[in-house]
Image (cartoon, grey):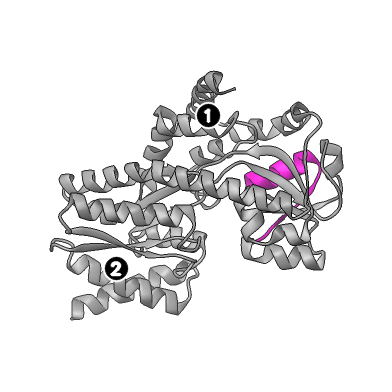
Amino acid sequence: MRYREKKMAGFLTLGQQGGFSRRQLLATGLAATVLSGCAKEPGMVFRTAEFHPKDYPTSMAITEMGRLMEGYSDGKLSLKLYAGSQLGAERDTLEMTTFGGIDINRVSLGPLNSIEPMTNILGLPFLFNNVAHMRYAMDGAPGQQVLRALDSHGLIGLCFYDSGARSFYNTKRPIRTPDDMAGMKFRVQNSDLYVSLIQELGGNPTPMALGEVYQSLVQGVIDGAENNWPSYYEGRHFEAAKYYSLTRHVIAPEVLVMSKQRWDMLSPAEQEIVQKSARESVPYMRTLWDAKTLEAEKAIRASGVQVNEVDDQQAFVERAQPVWSQYIRTAAERNLVDAITEMGAGHA
């Protein structure tokens, strides 16, 4: 008992340095202590964090991964999904995952950008020609290179999920050229890359949590934001921002990661089961995502939202080029960009 009390005290001290609430620390600390205490026993349950609700494609894919894992392990490995931000915001759950408080976590690129520069590359504007190009690259060598880069940060990259093509929407007017963005305040993720992108395109970036966007649009705190069809629809942002302009400026994946501490407790055979199950959940997620995207697009168009293609996407591409110069800093990052762009030849 003294050992567990001492371990909990150390966990609380570490967590307080990261700025977590005591309630979060007690919950995750207790889970980490209990799980580590039974790590060598059968019936391991991986505590899994997800920002999206349980019926969202990524959440459903994680559930499918758990089903596959149980089958491959004869019930010895499973996961419990805490969807809908039950364990906190993405930035907080990611930090908890790095030191073992959470076992598996689905996270967007934004929080990863601050710890692994290689993830910035996947969010570069106009890097991918389309969704098919992104999927092909992430299934291949470029994707594996980025996943391996997470190892040194206490994370095991398991697979990539989709988050669609992101476009701009606002309350004022259609965006047809970069000049149409001048003077407008756009919500962005808490990511320096996204801040730089909006600045280069002529807008005023406002970092903000996704949950605050709807009210901020209604109150005029911001003029617009950027996101994929499902997020624009399910967040009800289309009710306040009636102009959706198809810039498709970023087609970035999301990442499913596992705590390296937890991973190292597994046998090689168990690691293979986890990896195999994660990999096999990807096609399932994509099928769900494509259906949800089509459903959201149809609903938005039927609602009376003014949807437009931009006049000349190349004008946006050229305006965003300084972002590439800012975030491609090493030879390895340049090689990654080159590998991805070369793979795009068949997905024009």
Could you classify mark 2 by the number of other residues whose Cα lies within 10 Å: few (under 14), some (14-19), or many (20 or more)? many
User: For this view, does 68 lie left or right of residue 159?
Assistant: left
Could you classify mark 1 by the number of other residues whose Cα lies within 10 Å: few (under 14), some (14-19), or many (20 or more)? many
Up/down of 154 relative to 5, above or below? above
Q: Which residue is mark 1?
A: 133
- Which residue is more in the foreground, 293 or 59? 293
Q: Is residue 200 magenta?
A: yes
Q: Quadrant of residue 275?
A: top left
User: For this view, does 172 lie left or right of residue 135?
Assistant: right
Q: Quadrant of residue 1?
A: bottom left
Task: State the SS at label 2.
Answer: helix
The residue positioned 79% from the left and 54% from the top of the image is 242
Q: Is residue 322 magenta?
A: no
Up/down of 23 relative to 124, above or below? below
User: For this view, does 84 lie left or right of residue 61?
Assistant: right
User: For this view, does 332 lie left or right of residue 244?
Assistant: left
Q: Which mark is residue 193?
A: none
Residue type indicated by callout 2: Ala
Task: State the SS at label 1.
Answer: helix
3D distance between C-alphas at marks 2 and 1: 39 Å
The residue positioned 71% from the left and 59% from the top of the image is 237
Locate the C terminus and report the quarter of the image it occupies: top right
The residue positioned 77% from the left and 62% from the top of the image is 217
Q: Which mark is residue 32?
A: 2
- What x and y, as percent, mark residue 66? 30, 56
Whether residue 227 is visible to the viewer of this picture, yes or no, is no
Q: Tell us which disc is closer to us: 2 or 1.
A: 1
- What x and y, as percent, mark residue 118? 49, 37
Residue type indicated by callout 1: His
- What x and y, as percent, mark residue 7? 27, 72
Magenta stretch, residue numbers: 189-208
Q: Residue furthest left?
A: 41
